[in-house]
Amino acid sequence: MKLYHAPGSCSQAPHIALNEAGLSFDRVKVDVPTRTTETGGDFTEINPKGYVPALVFDNGEVLTENVAIITWIAEQAPHLIPSGPLGRIRMIEALGFMTEELHKPFLTYMFLPGDEMKAINRRVIGERFDYLAGQLKGAYLFGDDFSAADALLFVMVSWGRGFFDVKPPGALEAYHARVAERPAVQATLKAEGFA
């Protein structure tokens, strides 16, 4: 199995989830602007959408989109799925919210010119962070057990803290520090050149 990723991008979330699950996989870096793999291959031959992440199984089948990839990983390691009758669905709900309502404003902030648009997106990101801080139900998003959705929340908070100057609320700052200490997260950050 191969994870096609770009260090520090949203593909860091499935990278963390794979490490948390203890699954064996190879990493292939992608230069997203040129759509070229680290070996010089054309990434669009792997994922015609042209962006990361992409998970390629040993049989050649390709899975794309964070919600799908992270859900598949969690299904291989059920301890990454929140408990309860709606645990899996709540995880997918959280992944969908972060993908649609948090990831997109970050992209808009990065690519749309103008201070006014940046201010609007900074406010939206801040509101989304406030909402997610209120959703924490213990040490992690769904309680005292790390879930696959926590991998994506960690990446989004990292972006706010590092790349976009959107200060997360104190609860998310403490959350980020906790998650950053997890061995699987440390291994991911090291593999991506951040530790």
Image (spheres, rainbow, N blue to C red):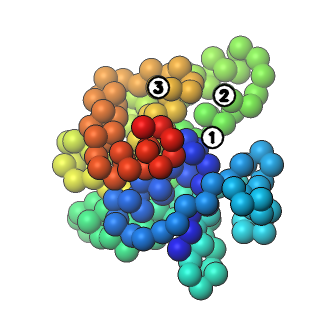
The residue tagged 3 is 161
Residue depicted at 67% across the width and 20% down the height: 118
Q: Earlier in the sequence, mark 1 or mark 2?
A: 1
Question: How far is the residue under mark 1 from the one under mark 2?
Answer: 9 Å
| Between discs 3 and 1, the one toward the N terminus | 1
Q: Residue at x 68, y 29 (%)?
A: 110
- Look at the image and tell me in which quarter the C terminus lies: top left
Q: Is residue 75 above or below residue 32?
A: below
Residue that carries the numbered disc 1 in the rendered image: 104
Mark 2 surroundings within 10 Å by alpha-carbon count, few (fewer than 14), some (14 through 19), many (20 or more): many
Percent x, y for residue 2?
56, 69
Asked if the residues shown at circle 2 and circle 3 are in contact, with their CB atoms under 8 angstroms apart, the answer is no
Mark 3 packing: few (<14 Cα in 10 Å), some, or many (20+)? some
Instruction: Using the rendered image of the protein, determine whether residue 34 is visible from the camera's viewpoint.
Output: yes
Q: Is residue 67 above or below residue 140?
A: below
Determine which quarter of the picture holds residue 53. Answer: bottom right
Quick one: label 2 or label 3, which is nearer the N terminus? Answer: 2
Q: Amino acid at mark 3?
A: Arg
Instruction: Decide which of 194, 185 is in the foreground and name it.
Output: 194
